[in-house]
Image (spheres, rainbow, N blue to C red):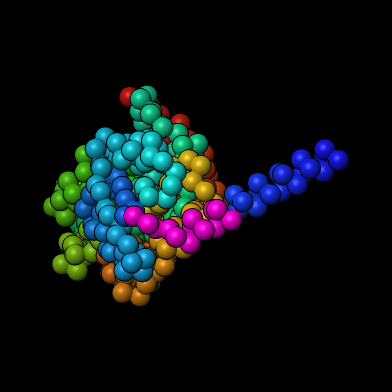
């Protein structure tokens, strides 16, 4: 009878744990939730908007804390070290969870092992824009022009190893174009030189470029993303023009520390997606140049792993070495 008793004890223990977890998730949150953001600017403002909506929905404060130092690594480390109790979450980008491991020898966290995926909340709409002085009006025309004048056309990005840089490397591999990369320290610097005509081609973001387009200083000819954007329906993704092109990651995703209980993962996933998808929030995200997505935790996990694998191939092809 001992095995039966042992089985009953295990069953009772499992039931107790299940009941305790369910009760805890129902009582959650019992104190403020801290969201650590690894970036600044418009993206941080949007996370703050989502946090405010979550506060309204939950009836409990969701506090935003910016920790963008060291390319967001400081914020990622803070969440990695936090207790997996649902009260500390990370809002971050491929900068920490895809590209960082290929750019630095001082990697202090594992983006897969040390975190629990919650949701890919939205994508930044990324574009290719050209100065009016360049005699092209479409992506196909740019490719043909670049092939006619190999190594003669320069393009700007926000830096080596960024998603914009990865998009340009993918275009080089899939379309067979040879253009000169001019990496800047920030997207603002590359944008200013693009509207001044110092660089004829810009890999940038819709939120920044659109004002220059309205003023006639730049032309958007393609999206770097794999999906179309409602506010620019006539602008095609590069993948619709170039066979084999697969848009690099431009997402903002939420993570918890490793070993975050499944019940809390599901609750946070539902609350973040609900807040980002609320009509008044989504309208502001759309207007700012962002696409609301709202994945499951499992989908984010698969996307993150696939993005790392793809980035590794592009980094190798580009000859980028970690520093």
Is residue 132 covered in magenta? no
Task: Report the residue that reaches farthest toward the right.
Answer: 1
Residue 33 in the image: state x and y as whole percent: 34, 53
Residue 200 in the image: state x and y as whole percent: 23, 50
* Residue 142 visible in the displayed image: no
Numbered label tally: 0
Residue 22 in the image: state x and y as whole percent: 54, 58
Return the residue nearer the eye: 120 or 12.
Answer: 12
Residue lying at 65% horizontally and 48% vertically, measured from the top left: 14
Return the residue nearer the eye: 25 or 214.
Answer: 25
Which region of the structure is painted magenta?
A: 19-31
Is residue 24 covered in magenta? yes
Task: Report the residue that reaches farthest toward the bottom.
Answer: 279
Residue 82 is drawn in which quadrant?
Answer: top left
Return the residue nearer the eye: 264 or 29.
Answer: 29
* Residue 291 visible in the displayed image: yes
Would residue 264 be found to the left or right of residue 93 on screen?
A: right
- Prevalent SS, magenta region: helix
Return the residue nearer the eye: 58 or 65.
Answer: 58
Residue lying at 41% horizontally and 32% vertically, measured from the top left: 109
Would residue 73 be found to the left or right of residue 69 on screen?
A: right
Task: Report the residue that reaches farthest toward the left.
Answer: 196
Q: Is residue 227 above or below residue 242?
A: below
Residue lying at 75% horizontally and 47% vertically, measured from the top left: 8
Would residue 223 be found to the left or right of residue 134 on screen?
A: right
Would residue 208 be found to the left or right of residue 25 on screen?
A: left
Residue 57 in the image: state x and y as whole percent: 36, 69
Residue lying at 48% horizontally and 62% vertically, measured from the top left: 26
Question: Quadrant where the N terminus lies?
Answer: top right
Question: Quadrant where the C terminus lies?
Answer: top left
């Amino acid at each position: 009878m001992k095995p039966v008793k042992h089985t009953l004890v295990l069953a009772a223990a499992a039931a107790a744990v299940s009941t305790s977890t369910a009760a805890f998730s129902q009582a959650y949150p019992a104190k403020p939730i801290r969201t650590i953001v690894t970036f600044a600017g418009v993206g941080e403002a949007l996370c703050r908007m989502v946090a405010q909506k979550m506060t309204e929905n939950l009836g409990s404060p969701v506090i935003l804390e910016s920790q963008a130092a060291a390319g967001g690594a400081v914020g990622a480390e803070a969440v990695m070290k936090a207790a997996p109790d649902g009260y500390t979450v990370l809002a971050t980008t491929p900068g920490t969870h895809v590209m960082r491991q290929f750019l630095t020898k001082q990697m202090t966290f594992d983006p897969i092992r040390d975190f629990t995926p919650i949701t890919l909340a939205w994508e930044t709409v990324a574009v290719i824009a050209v100065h009016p002085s360049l005699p092209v009006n479409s992506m196909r025309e740019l490719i043909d022009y670049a092939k006619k004048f190999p190594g003669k056309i320069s393009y700007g990005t926000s830096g080596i190893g960024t998603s914009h840089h990865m998009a340009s490397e993918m275009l080089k591999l899939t379309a067979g174009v040879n253009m000169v990369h001019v990496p800047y320290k920030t997207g603002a610097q590359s944008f200013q030189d693009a509207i001044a005509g110092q660089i004829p081609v810009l890999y940038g973001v819709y939120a920044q470029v659109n004002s220059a387009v309205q003023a006639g200083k730049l032309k958007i000819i393609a999206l770097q993303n794999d999906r179309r954007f409602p506010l620019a329906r006539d602008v095609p993704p590069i993948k619709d023009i170039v066979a084999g092109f697969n848009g690099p990651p431009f997402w903002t995703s939420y993570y918890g520390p490793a070993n975050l209980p499944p019940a809390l993962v599901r609750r946070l996933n539902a609350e973040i997606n609900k807040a980002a998808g609320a009509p008044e929030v989504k309208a502001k995200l759309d207007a700012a140049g962002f696409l609301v997505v709202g994945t499951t935790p499992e989908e984010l996990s698969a996307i993150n792993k696939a993005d790392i694998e793809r980035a590794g191939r592009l980094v190798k092809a580009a000859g980028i070495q970690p520093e």
